[in-house]
Image (spheres, rainbow, N blue to C red):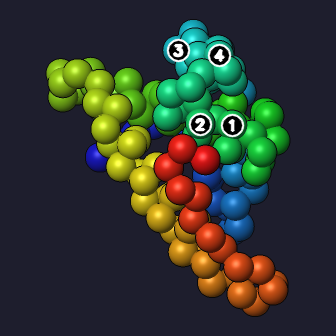
Amino acid sequence: MALHSPLLPSNSISGGQVPSAKTRHVNSRAAEAFRLAAQSLHGSLSSPGELYRHLRARLGNPKAITAAAHKLARIFFRLVTTKQPYDETVFAQNEALYHKRLEKRLKTQAPLLGYELTPLLPGE
């Protein structure tokens, strides 16, 4: 089932070309609420807050707000349709996988750049 939301781009195709993949401008109170919620994630220490800051560094602020709002809308839709409580452990698992990939990449890049990685001992 496709999720149609005011936060999704309208990918219409005309003559085999996509005229515009930008997000539609709509007067939706829900879209505005999700965007405001996404903006408030700036200082949040939660996983969605980390996601927003990561997106903002990569995409810039306007696109990060829209992407984070879309993520919040998908979380909200999932919570409402399944009637289950919010589970932060899914984000924690994804964050752990991200850190493992980052560590692996650093271990391969460090010798190529002439550096040596040494792990910190607990308490340092």
Q: CA distance from mark 1 to mark 2?
A: 5 Å
Label whose residue precedes the other's in the sequence (2 or 3):
3
Dot 3: what SS?
Answer: helix
Given the image, on which type of amino acid does mark 3 rest? Answer: Ala
- The image quarter in which residue 88 lies: top left
Q: Are marks 1 and 2 in contact (CB under 8 Å)?
A: yes
Q: Circle 4 sits on which residue? A: 40
The furthest residue to the bottom = 112
Name which residue lies at 78% across and 33% down: 62
Label whose residue precedes the other's in the sequence (3 or 1):
3
Label whose residue precedes the other's in the sequence (2 or 4):
4
| Structural crowding at the residue carrying mark 2, measured as other residues with C-alpha within 10 Å and reported as few (<14), some (14–19) or many (≥20) | some
Dot 4: what SS?
Answer: helix
Label whose residue precedes the other's in the sequence (3 or 4):
3
Given the image, on which type of amino acid does mark 1 rest? Answer: Arg
- The image quarter in which residue 38 lies: top right
> On screen, 37 above or below 45?
above
Given the image, on which type of amino acid does mark 2 rest? Answer: Glu
Q: CA distance from mark 3 to mark 4?
A: 15 Å
Report whether 99 appears left or right of 106.
left
Q: Circle 1 sits on which residue? A: 53
Q: For marks 3 and 4, give the one nearer the viewer.
A: 4
Q: CA distance from mark 1 to mark 4?
A: 11 Å
Picture disc at residue 30: 3
Q: CA distance from mark 2 to mark 3?
A: 23 Å
- Residue 43 horizontal/vertical position (percent): 67, 20
Q: CA distance from mark 2 to mark 4?
A: 12 Å
Given the image, on which type of amino acid does mark 4 rest? Answer: Ser
Report whether 70 appears left or right of 76.
right
Picture disc at residue 50: 2
| Structural crowding at the residue carrying mark 4, measured as other residues with C-alpha within 10 Å and reported as few (<14), some (14–19) or many (≥20) | few
